[in-house]
Structures are given as C-alpha cells and as structure tokens.
Image: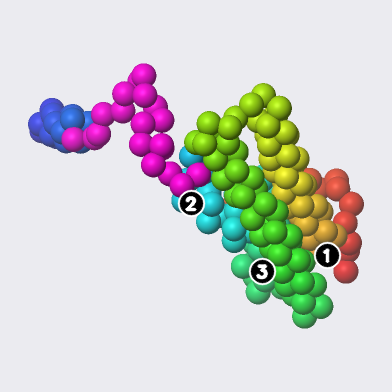
Amino acid sequence: MPRVDSMLMLAAVLGAAIAWPAVRADAPYAGLEHRRIKVLSTEQVDDLLRGRGMGLALPAELNGYPGPRHVLDLADRLGLTPEQRSDTERLFQDMQAGAMALGERIVAGEAALDELFAAGRASETAVRQAALELGRLEGELRALHLNYHLAMRDLLTREQTAAYQELKGYRSHASGHRHKSH
C-alpha cells in the first residue's frame, strides 16, 4: 500500500504547514521590535557575553587550524601531553577572556545604536560613527578567534591535527601547512 503511505505522509506535511505560523513576506521583522537590542537575539547576546566563537573562525577551523575549545573537548582522543593540555587550557582561557571583553563592547555598542534611533537622536554622523566602531569591534573579535586557532595549530603535531580533522568529520585540506612535530 505505498499509495496510502504516501497520502498519509502528504496529509501530515500539509497539516504541519497549515499549523505553522504564517510569516508575512512584507513584514519579515515583525516581532523583533520587542527585543531589548533589536539587531541581536537573546542567543546572540549570550554568545557574545560568554565569549563563544559563533562560527567566526570557520576559515581556520575548516582548513586544518583547530580551536582551543574543541581541542580540549577531544584532548584524550588526541593524546595531548600534559604540557599541551596546560597550554591549550591557557589559550582557551585567554581567548575567552578577550572574546568576552569584546563581546561586552559589541553588545553595548549595539544597544547604543538602537537607542539613537529609539530616542530620535539618529543622525548621519552619529550612525556612521557607531556603525564603523561596531564593524571595527566585530573585526577584532573575529581576528581574535582566528589567531587563537593559529596558536592552537602550532601546539599540535601533524598527527594530532590530522586526527582532529578526522574526529570532527572534516577532510584534510591543510596537510602542507607548517606546524610543530613532536
């Protein structure tokens, strides 16, 4: 009875589609006006304030430059030496502290930009200045995360980097990059 199964599946999909809240094509931002900071979700604010990577270092991560947090998660499986583990913990703590400090400044900057508009004080000069500063801070945050991936790569052996890529399910594109061999 494949036809009955197909019809039941179609009915289930249609029922779910009807129950799904309609999003107006002409109002994709409806509901966002209630956010504390309009441009940032609660999750984004939390990520920024906790120093999370948020995918900012994907060019490094996916090209054979592991991040400290993920290396710590896989420390046993990668066979980190006690010295490597200690160095990785230090790198992670330093990276997170720097990311949290920048994240706080980004959240504050977004709140200030939002307030310019909410209070009716937005001008071309004020908006340009705030937007440029936010762009600079976001660039600093991204560079911070990327540079800690560079530092992490230098702590690992070639074999550990290859094992990391395999454990994470990445294909190795970076076998020619230079890093320590213990």
Q: Quadrant location of residue 110? A: top right
- Distance from label 3 to label 2 (Cα)? 23 Å
Q: Residues within 10 Å of mark 1 (few under 14, many from 20)?
A: many
Q: What residue is disc 1 on?
A: 155
Residue 135: x and y in percent read 71, 37
Q: Are marks 3 and 2 in contact (CB under 8 Å)?
A: no
Q: What residue is disc 2 on?
A: 43
Residue 77: x and y in percent read 64, 70
Residue 34, above or below 169: above
Magenta segment? 19-37
The label shown at residue 72 is 3
SS class, disc 2:
helix
Which is nearer the N-term, disc 3 or disc 1?
A: 3
Depth check: give the residue in front, 79 or 103.
103
Kind of residue at disc 1: Leu
Residue 23, above or below 100: above
Q: Residue at x 89, y 61 (%)?
A: 180
Q: Which of the image's four quarters has the C terminus? A: bottom right
Kind of residue at disc 2: Glu
Residue 124 visible to the viewer: yes
Q: Residues within 10 Å of mark 2 (few under 14, many from 20)?
A: few
Residue 13, above or below 61: above
Residue 166 visible to the viewer: no
Q: Residue at x 41, y 37 (%)?
A: 32
Q: Which of the image's four quarters has the N terminus? A: top left
SS class, disc 1:
helix
